[in-house]
Image (spheres, coloured by chain):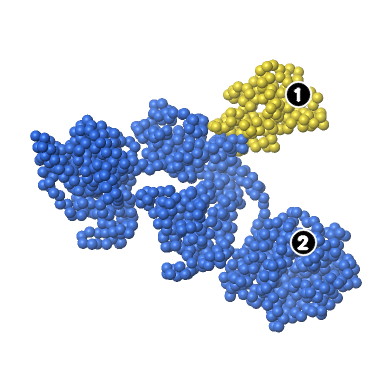
């Protein structure tokens, strides 16, 4: 879903709910409409020769899901799952069964469409990343919360990112 | 253009296809029984075509209806016995069936397909009979004759005012038409007088009349008006009519011109023959037609129902009990069958409700309404089938698979000490298994779906090729997974065509050979060992091995020499190798094998195997083995590090476990990869962890040095053992080294996620019993990734070219002759082993002979030559054929035990006699190593050696003559050495030319012996090097050559500089030659010496 469509949606509905999570201590969020469930299962089956972003397979109630490492996808360093790690499973309409491994799950945040701003780099290190994110259509926009800056991601672009590689 | 509900059209197409599919086979059967017709069968065909016609007519597929109509007419003639269904008549019917199929494929455009020619060709068979009918009163009725010309004219003349005006009554119209020219004789079957028009009610139609109906009407609708005024589609009309009765027949009238401008705005008349229990007055109300458009064709004199307003009631109260009132009806029907059916009806009206003859399956979609209304339907179709979208079944399949997994997890976690939960768990187990099986069964389809096409295919081929071939089908009801079945259709057709084209001879040819003129192709399907077996067998000319050989040579696939070493079976298998027959498809080659590799690959992709067998002159038999389903497959579960992997059982040939020393010793390095010598074949080894962890070899640039992993280094060598599976993938075989073998399990295959499906080494994924995901390895993919597949066969034969020169063991065949002793013969000396029947052995003098490969072969009986126990000879024995013998001999053995590694050094003390090389302890038994070549000599009884000559040579030298034996093959080396030793020579051995040359340079010898037969050019180079210079350039040299190419090799050897050449392992000649050579050398030396002095 491109930014325009989300924004358009937001304009009509005025509010959008986001499922937030942390990666590398930063707050990210995806449209909660795209999320099927949050799972604690982090015992993955490695798939050798798969792209770096692929963490492996996990079985969730009989259905095999591909798990992406969102840290790698966004250009952060990889980190082994710990007790706070969760897998965000996306709905079937986002793509073939898959989920994304995140460091820690956050709250559900409701934001208004007018609060979503275009993403801009905060420092030089991020400037490089910014291109990466933008090019791949990963980021929809940012939203300033009270304490944090929330980066809104587009779940639909996750699989595409490395399928094209 | 009339608009039809898409869904209804689709349904019509699906149903029509089903009908047509059955027609084909039935027509074939009819053709066969041409004289003694099976009425049921022809009725079945008739009904199928009739149904198609009816539905097509209603839906406006006019051409289709036209075609079906003439076919139906012809069929009715056949049924009546007027026309014999010989091939001339059946042919156009087949064409009609094909055409209907074509039309159904693209139903929307079916009206654009020209059918006139075809219709005419069918009518050709109808016309003569129809004319004849005018002369003779026949018990046949042509139903719904196409409108006569007069009638058409009349219709054309009729002003195209909206029809139901009543001023031009149909009855009048029809009467006029009849009197105008209709001369058709009344049929006695048809009790309807002609007053009702030219419509004759055939018994066919009568049979379809439900018992509940008392009236048959002819209704004339104007479809155009119906659509515009009432907004009713013909389908809706059909439905409506069927609610209160039954449509027996329909006929739409229009002229051809109308169609070109699209469907008419003008009135489009549709006549409906309608059976109902409603009286005429009410019919007017129900149908909305005017009086003139309703003609009563027939009233059954049954007890009239009370005039009830609702149709439902009418039907419910339908009285059957009054027998006497049925009589009229019964009398009116002269056809026995009908009488039977109605008799039945009287006896048991209730069952008749179920059995009521009603073939018009077009109504099946209205089943529901009919049930409510209580209108009887034939029991035949009830509840038998239900049409489902495959995706629904696939979904169920997935869920069933998941249920199996849940079950597995549940069984694991259940508290076995609690009887209640244990019982529940067991029941869950049973139910789950059953659900799984049932759902699997829904995907199953009989192989008859494919098989039943073949009679037709073969019939066509018979005509094209002028052959007489019959097909014999067995096991058509064996069921296979839909996916497999679909993938199998083409390969099977290919094989059958192949058999017809090239396998079966022409009738003349067959006659000459004394075969039955009619060739037979047998198709057989059966279950065996959890697999589906399909055998296609013909009794044709079989495959000519000679032609395969020629082809193989001309295609440079094999050399003549290679071919001579191959068994018949191996030669036959060349036909299924890719590229065996490509460009000049069906040429001089007996034709078999065209594209067989494609078939083989196809079958293997389905996880099956393909086998071919042929007896020249007697036919070919092809054997396909296929798994029942693709969704659940048995797999070998292995562990590598922390991960488990599944390997499909079909890929696993065997499992090997090496212990201790073997781990280090048996895995060798050849070129850039590890190999293992498995029963004398080199097997490329692949380490799974390397496959998974390393980058794939992406060309030659990869400089990944092979690391010889030793037992101490690697975790997978823990406990000093190493496991590997021998996997076969396509044409190649390789060993896959894994950590641990867990066991076998039936797993549910799930495809790889699209994002990772491009990785070559996985075939899918599965969920294991503990809920963890395991990946399924793709043997073919791994072979490709590691480069084995591109190297060709991974298991190159290493016969005679053993790479390790220092090996001190060799592989022997263990066998028994008598009960007591165990024998061993080196595998490298054995050409092959043949199973023989003792009764085909002939006696000649004191010797026994048997014909093998067309050559009379002498049997060697061990107990006659050496002191071993006698053998109780069975009917069936084995014959061991040694290599390199001067004449064909075979050693008779009673039991084959196994192959075993044996030391090259044998014990020569404990038990020795002439004809024995020595003994060794193998498998805890004293094993005798017979000297095959000595035995050949002994059995020949010409063991007359010139002892004197040998002794002479011995005496002349003050020291023992020293001979250098250059022999590559380790076993051969031992043998040569032993022979020479036995003569008292001192022997030095060399395995390579380099080594030999070094020794020639450094040491002194009296003679050289070189095994040119197996060393080839190297052997020749060696002698040239020796002769080329050095102090021993004049040494006498003996070349050992093979008996097969004696003259050629001898010439080459002598040309290169050998003094002499003798047949390899012809012990006496060999020793004699050595003696002579030494003698000569000594003499000349002494002469030279004399000269010098």
What's the residue at 43%, 48% (across, down)? B557
Dot 1 falls on a residue whose secondary structure is: loop
Which chain shows up in blue? B
Discs 2, 1 touching: Cβ within 8 Å: no
Q: Is B732 situated left or right of B347 in this image?
A: left
Q: Is B280 situated left or right of B47 in this image?
A: right
Chain letter of the residue beneath label 2 in the structure image: B
Residue B1036 percent coordinates (x, y): 20, 40
- Label placed on residue A67: none
Residue B1078 percent coordinates (x, y): 16, 41
What's the residue at 42%, 33% (across, down)? B672
What's the residue at 41%, 54% (across, down)? B550
Q: Residues within 10 Å of mark 2 (few under 14, many from 20)?
A: some
Q: Quadrant of residue B737?
A: top left
Q: Residues within 10 Å of mark 1 (few under 14, many from 20)?
A: few
Residue B685 percent coordinates (x, y): 43, 36
CA gap, disc 2 and disc 1: 61 Å
Q: Which residue is mark 2?
A: B60
Q: Is residue A33 above or below residue B598?
A: above
Residue B522 percent coordinates (x, y): 50, 62
Furthest residue to the top? Answer: A123
Which chain shows up in yellow? A
Chain letter of the residue beneath label 1 in the structure image: A
What's the residue at 48%, 61% (across, down)? B503
Q: Which residue is mark 1?
A: A118
**Quadrant occupied by the N terminus of chain B:** bottom right
Q: Quadrant of residue B852?
A: bottom left
Dot 2 falls on a residue whose secondary structure is: loop
């Amino acid at each position: 879903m491109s930014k325009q469509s989300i924004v358009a949606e937001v304009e009509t509905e005025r509010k959008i709910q986001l499922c937030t999570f942390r990666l590398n201590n930063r707050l990210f969020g995806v449209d909660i409409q795209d999320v099927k469930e949050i799972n604690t299962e982090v015992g993955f089956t490695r798939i050798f020769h798969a792209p770096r972003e692929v963490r492996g397979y996990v079985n969730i109630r009989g259905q095999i899901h591909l798990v992406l490492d969102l840290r790698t996808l966004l250009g952060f360093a990889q980190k082994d799952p710990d007790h706070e790690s969760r897998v965000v499973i996306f709905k079937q309409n986002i793509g073939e069964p898959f989920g994304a491994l995140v460091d820690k799950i956050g709250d559900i945040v409701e934001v208004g469409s007018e609060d979503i701003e275009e993403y801009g780099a905060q420092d030089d290190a991020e400037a490089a990343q910014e291109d990466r994110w933008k090019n791949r259509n990963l980021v929809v926009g940012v939203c300033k919360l009270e304490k944090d800056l929330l980066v809104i991601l587009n779940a639909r672009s996750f699989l595409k990112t490395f399928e094209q590689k | 253009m009339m608009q039809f509900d898409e869904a209804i059209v689709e349904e019509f197409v699906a149903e029509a296809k089903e009908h047509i599919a059955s027609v084909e086979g039935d027509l074939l059967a009819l053709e066969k029984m041409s004289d003694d017709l099976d009425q049921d069968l022809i009725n079945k065909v008739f009904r199928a075509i009739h149904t198609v016609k009816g539905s097509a007519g209603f839906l406006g597929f006019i051409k289709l209806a036209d075609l079906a109509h003439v076919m139906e007419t012809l069929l009715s003639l056949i049924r009546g016995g007027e026309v014999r269904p010989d091939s001339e008549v059946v042919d156009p019917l087949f064409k009609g069936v094909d055409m209907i199929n074509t039309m159904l494929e693209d139903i929307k455009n079916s009206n654009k397909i020209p059918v006139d020619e075809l219709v005419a060709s069918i009518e050709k068979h109808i016309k003569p009979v129809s004319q004849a009918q005018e002369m003779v009163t026949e018990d046949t009725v042509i139903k719904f004759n196409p409108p006569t010309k007069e009638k058409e004219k009349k219709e054309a003349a009729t002003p195209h005012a909206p029809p139901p005006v009543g001023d031009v009554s149909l009855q009048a119209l029809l009467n006029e038409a009849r009197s105008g020219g209709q001369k058709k004789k009344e049929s006695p079957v048809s009790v309807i007088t002609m007053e009702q028009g030219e419509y004759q009610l055939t018994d066919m139609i009568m049979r379809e009349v439900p018992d509940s109906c008392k009236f048959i009407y002819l209704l004339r609708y104007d479809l155009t008006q119906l659509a515009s005024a009432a907004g009713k589609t013909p389908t809706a009309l059909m439905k409506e009519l069927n609610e209160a009765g039954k449509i027996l027949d329909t006929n739409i009238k229009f002229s051809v011109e109308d169609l070109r401008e699209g469907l008419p705005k003008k009135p489009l008349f549709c006549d409906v023959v309608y059976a109902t229990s409603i009286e005429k007055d009410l019919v007017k109300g129900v149908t909305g037609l005017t009086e003139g458009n309703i003609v009563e064709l027939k009233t059954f004199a049954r007890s009239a129902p009370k005039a009830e307003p609702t149709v439902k009631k009418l039907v419910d109260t339908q009285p059957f009990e009054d027998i006497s009132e049925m009589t009229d009806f019964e009398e009116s029907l002269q056809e026995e069958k009908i009488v039977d059916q109605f008799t039945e009806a009287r006896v048991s009206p209730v069952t008749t409700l179920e059995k009521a003859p009603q073939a018009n399956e077009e109504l099946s979609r209205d089943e529901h309404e009919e049930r409510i209304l209580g209108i009887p339907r034939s029991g035949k179709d009830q509840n038998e089938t239900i049409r489902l979208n495959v995706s629904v079944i696939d979904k169920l399949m997935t869920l069933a698979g998941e249920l199996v997994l849940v079950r597995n997890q549940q069984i694991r976690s259940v508290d076995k000490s609690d009887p209640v939960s244990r019982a529940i768990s067991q029941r869950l187990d049973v139910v789950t298994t059953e659900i799984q099986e049932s759902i699997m069964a829904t995907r199953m389809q009989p192989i008859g779906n494919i098989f039943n096409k073949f009679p037709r295919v073969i019939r066509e081929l018979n005509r094209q090729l002028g052959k007489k071939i019959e097909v014999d089908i067995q096991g058509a009801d064996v069921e296979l997974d839909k996916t497999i079945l679909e993938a199998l259709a083409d390969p099977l057709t290919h094989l059958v065509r192949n058999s017809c084209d090239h396998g079966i001879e022409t009738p003349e040819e067959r006659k000459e050979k004394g075969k039955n003129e009619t060739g037979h192709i047998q198709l057989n399907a059966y279950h065996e060992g959890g697999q589906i077996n399909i055998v296609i067998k013909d009794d044709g000319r079989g495959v000519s091995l000679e032609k395969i050989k020629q082809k193989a040579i001309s295609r440079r696939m094999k050399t003549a020499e290679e071919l001579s070493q191959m068994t018949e079976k191996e030669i036959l298998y060349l036909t299924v190798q890719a590229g065996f027959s490509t460009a000049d498809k069906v040429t001089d080659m007996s034709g078999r094998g065209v594209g067989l590799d494609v078939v083989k690959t196809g079958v293997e992709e389905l996880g099956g195997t393909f086998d071919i067998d042929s007896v020249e002159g007697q036919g070919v038999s092809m054997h396909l083995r296929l798994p029942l389903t693709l969704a659940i497959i048995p797999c070998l579960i292995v562990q590598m590090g922390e991960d488990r992997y599944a390997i499909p059982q079909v890929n696993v040939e065997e499992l090997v476990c090496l212990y201790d020393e073997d781990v280090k010793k048996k895995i060798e390095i050849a070129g850039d990869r590890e190999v293992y010598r498995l029963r004398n074949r080199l097997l490329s080894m692949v380490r799974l962890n390397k496959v998974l962890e390393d980058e794939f070899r992406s060309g030659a640039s990869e400089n990944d040095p092979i690391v010889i992993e030793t037992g101490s280094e690697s975790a997978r060598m823990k406990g000093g053992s190493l496991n590997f599976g021998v996997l076969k993938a396509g044409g190649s075989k390789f060993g896959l080294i894994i950590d641990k073998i867990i066991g076998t399990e039936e797993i549910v295959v799930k495809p790889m996620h699209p994002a990772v499906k491009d990785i070559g080494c996985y075939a899918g994924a599965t969920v294991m019993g503990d809920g963890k995901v395991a990946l399924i390895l793709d043997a073919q993919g791994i072979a490709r990734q590691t480069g084995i597949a591109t190297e060709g066969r991974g298991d190159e034969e290493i016969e005679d070219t053993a790479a390790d020169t220092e090996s001190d063991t060799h592989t022997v065949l263990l066998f028994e002759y008598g009960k007591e002793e165990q024998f061993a013969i080196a595998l490298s000396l054995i050409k092959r082993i043949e199973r023989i029947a003792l009764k085909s052995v002939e006696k000649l003098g004191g010797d026994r002979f048997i014909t093998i490969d067309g050559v009379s072969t002498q049997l060697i009986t061990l107990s006659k030559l050496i002191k071993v126990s006698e053998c109780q000879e069975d009917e069936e024995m084995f014959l061991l054929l040694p290599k390199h013998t001067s004449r064909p001999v075979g050693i008779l053995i009673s039991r084959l035990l196994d192959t075993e590694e044996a030391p090259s050094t044998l014990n020569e003390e404990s038990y020795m006699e002439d004809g024995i090389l020595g003994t060794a302890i193998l498998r805890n038994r004293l094993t005798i190593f017979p000297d095959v070549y000595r035995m050949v000599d002994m059995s020949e009884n010409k063991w007359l050696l010139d002892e004197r000559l040998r002794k002479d040579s011995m005496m002349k030298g003050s020291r023992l003559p020293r001979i250098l034996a250059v022999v590559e093959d380790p076993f051969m080396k031992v043998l040569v050495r032993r022979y020479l030793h036995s003569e008292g020579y001192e022997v030095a051995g060399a395995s390579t030319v380099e080594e030999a040359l070094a020794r020639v340079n450094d040491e002194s010898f009296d003679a050289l012996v070189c095994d040119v037969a197996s060393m080839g050019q190297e052997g020749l180079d060696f002698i040239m090097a020796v002769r080329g210079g050095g102090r021993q350039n004049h040494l006498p040299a003996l070349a050992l050559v093979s008996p097969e190419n004696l003259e050629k090799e001898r010439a080459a050897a002598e040309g290169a500089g050998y003094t002499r050449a003798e047949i390899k392992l012809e012990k006496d000649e060999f020793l004699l030659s050595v003696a002579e050579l030494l003698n000569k050398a000594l003499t000349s030396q002494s002469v030279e010496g004399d000269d010098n002095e």
